[in-house]
């Protein structure tokens, strides 16, 4: 069974440029998560989807970040415009459902904003 | 408020030593789940264990064991006879069990474990 797929693995952009990350969860997983992980810290949830509905986006900086999961399968996270402080690893994870189910993580996208 | 504290930022031990990683949590819920994940140098977090708030039985899986104590709000992880391959960052996480937009998921800041040969 294929795991969570993320692309690209690495991205270097200049500040004020836009950037997008893509995630394809494990087949059959209804819940999809986007996390940001700063160096030396734990993952911080940005947004959680139940199918195509964003049920928790309280930590998403909505002035510059957006996300979508149109058909309840793959998802895109966008930053526009990027700032220096956005440099981090962006992790996507999926699970069968929320709450008790373990999450399966992708390899992440390491973003560097210069 | 929900919180997960991993006070040990870094631990370094010699191979074959036992090592315990501490995790202390805070939640207002009576029903919740606790997790441990491992993040090796490759970067991909790997699920290790899940515990629900009603099950305080300790669990052992090979060289790994977990001690869940509600009285002290702790969910500690012990590696027995550590090996170099255990070197990684370990994260403790808390998830509320309510299936709703209000259920929160939070990770601790992680403990970097280095096993020296």
Image: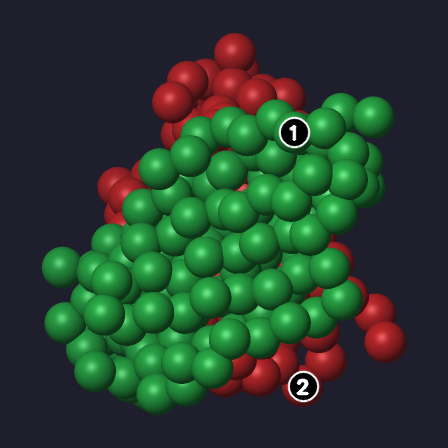
Residue at 63% x, 22% y: name it. Answer: A12
Q: Position of residue A31 (x, y in %)?
A: 51, 77
Of residue A106 and residue B7, the one placed in the foreground of this image is: B7
SS type, badge 1: strand
**Which residue lies under the disc numbered 2?**
A28
Q: Position of residue A81 (x, y in %)?
A: 40, 30
Q: Quadrant of the N terminus of chain A?
A: bottom right
Local crowd size for mark 2, using a 10 Å CA cut-off: few (<14), some (14–19), many (≥20): few
Q: Quadrant of residue B40?
A: top right
Of residue B35 and residue A96, the one placed in the foreground of this image is: B35
- Chain painted in green in the figure: B
The outermost residue toward the top is A114
**Which residue lies under the disc numbered 1?**
B13
Q: Taking the image as drawn, is residue A96 in sight?
A: yes
Residue at 37% x, 64% y: name it. Answer: B94
Q: Along the horizontal axis of the image, is B96 left or right of B55?
A: left
Q: Chain of mark 1?
A: B
Q: Taking the image as drawn, is residue A43 in sight?
A: no
Local crowd size for mark 1, using a 10 Å CA cut-off: few (<14), some (14–19), many (≥20): some
Q: Colour of chain A?
A: red
Tell us which disc is closer to us: 2 or 1.
Answer: 1
Quick check: B11 above or below B63?
above
Q: Position of residue B15 (x, y in %)?
A: 77, 34
Q: Along the horizontal axis of the image, is A12 left or right of B77?
A: right
């Amino acid at each position: 069974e294929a795991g969570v797929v993320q692309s690209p693995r690495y991205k270097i952009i200049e500040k004020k440029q836009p950037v997008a990350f893509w995630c394809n969860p494990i087949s059959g997983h209804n819940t999809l998560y986007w996390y940001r992980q700063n160096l030396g810290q734990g993952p911080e949830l940005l947004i959680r989807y139940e199918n195509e509905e964003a049920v928790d986006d309280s930590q998403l900086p909505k002035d510059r970040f957006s996300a979508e999961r149109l058909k309840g399968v793959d998802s895109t996270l966008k930053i526009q415009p990027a700032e220096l402080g956005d440099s981090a690893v962006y992790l996507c994870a999926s699970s069968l459902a929320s709450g008790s189910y373990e999450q399966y993580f992708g390899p992440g996208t390491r973003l560097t904003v210069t | 408020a929900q919180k997960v504290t991993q006070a040990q930022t870094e631990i370094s031990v010699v191979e074959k030593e036992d090592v315990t990683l501490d995790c202390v949590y805070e939640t207002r819920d009576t029903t919740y789940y606790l997790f441990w994940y491992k993040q090796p140098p490759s970067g991909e977090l790997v699920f290790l264990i899940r515990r629900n708030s009603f099950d305080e039985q300790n669990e052992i899986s090979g060289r790994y064991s977990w001690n869940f104590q509600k009285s002290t709000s702790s969910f500690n992880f012990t590696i027995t006879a550590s090996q170099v391959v255990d070197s990684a960052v370990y994260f403790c996480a808390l998830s509320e069990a309510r299936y709703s937009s209000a259920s929160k998921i939070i990770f601790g800041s992680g403990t970097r474990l280095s096993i020296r040969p």
